[in-house]
Amino acid sequence: MRTGKRTAFLALFCLFACVGVFHRTVKAQSLPPAKYDGFVYTNHKVDSDTIMIEAFFDPVCPDSRDSWPPLKQAIQHYGSRVSLIIHLLPLPYHDYAFATSRALHVVNMLNPSATFRLLESFFEDQDRFYNDQTRNMSRVAVLNEIIKFTAEAVGNSYYSAIQSGFNDRKTDLKTRISFKEKLGFKGREPGEPEKGEVG
């Protein structure tokens, strides 16, 4: 009789442990975005003859900055035959790449027509948020500078909305999910096989 109670207790314990682990695993996975990710630069009809260019930029990366003018020139040259979508890929070795990318998401939610103006402002004044220039500043001080800079670039009337955007968990998640999408995680953990993939 005693062995039966132990077995039942052990089985019940294992069941609760498995449910707890499963519940935590499910909560930890993020959902893929509801719509296609990225900022559309060209605003014209896209059909089967349109060439789709997708660029992956970091707002504080010198290589992204240097590739932007020739990319814009090519888009202008080819006109409606090409379409450009910019994806943000904040690189981990640029200390405030994530925060500047988040600023772009915040502005895109507030006024999509100002998104590329802000991106170009980051490119023009990139040194202001680069690693060496922010080394002796606190994280809060740098974030406040990014908020102030963003408001100056898109219009000071947006200052409080931008500040609120940085306190909104949704913009944080939007930037994180966008980043994970670029790395190919698409709602799964690194190393986890994709649906239908034999692993």
Image (spheres, rainbow, N blue to C red):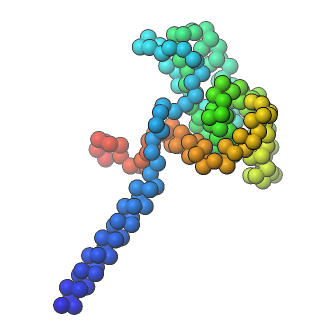
In the rendering, at what x and y percent does residue 54 appear? Answer: 53, 25
Residue drawn at point x = 73 percent, y = 44 percent: 163
Camera-side residue: 189 or 175? 175
Q: Is residue 17 left or right of residue 119?
A: left
Determine whether 93 is above or below 107 in the image: below
Q: Measuring from the top left, give residue 58's x and y in whole percent.
A: 64, 35
Q: Report the front residue among 183 and 47.
A: 47
Residue at screen point 23% across, 81% down? 7
Quadrant housing residue 59: top right
| Residue 147 placement, left or right of 9 | right
Give above or below for 14 relative to 32. Answer: below
Can residue 113 be seen at all in this image of the molecule? Answer: yes
Total labels: the figure holds 0
| Quarter of image, res 67 | top right
Quadrant where the N terminus is found in the figure: bottom left
Residue placed most toward the observer, 106 or 14: 106
Determine if residue 63 is in view: no
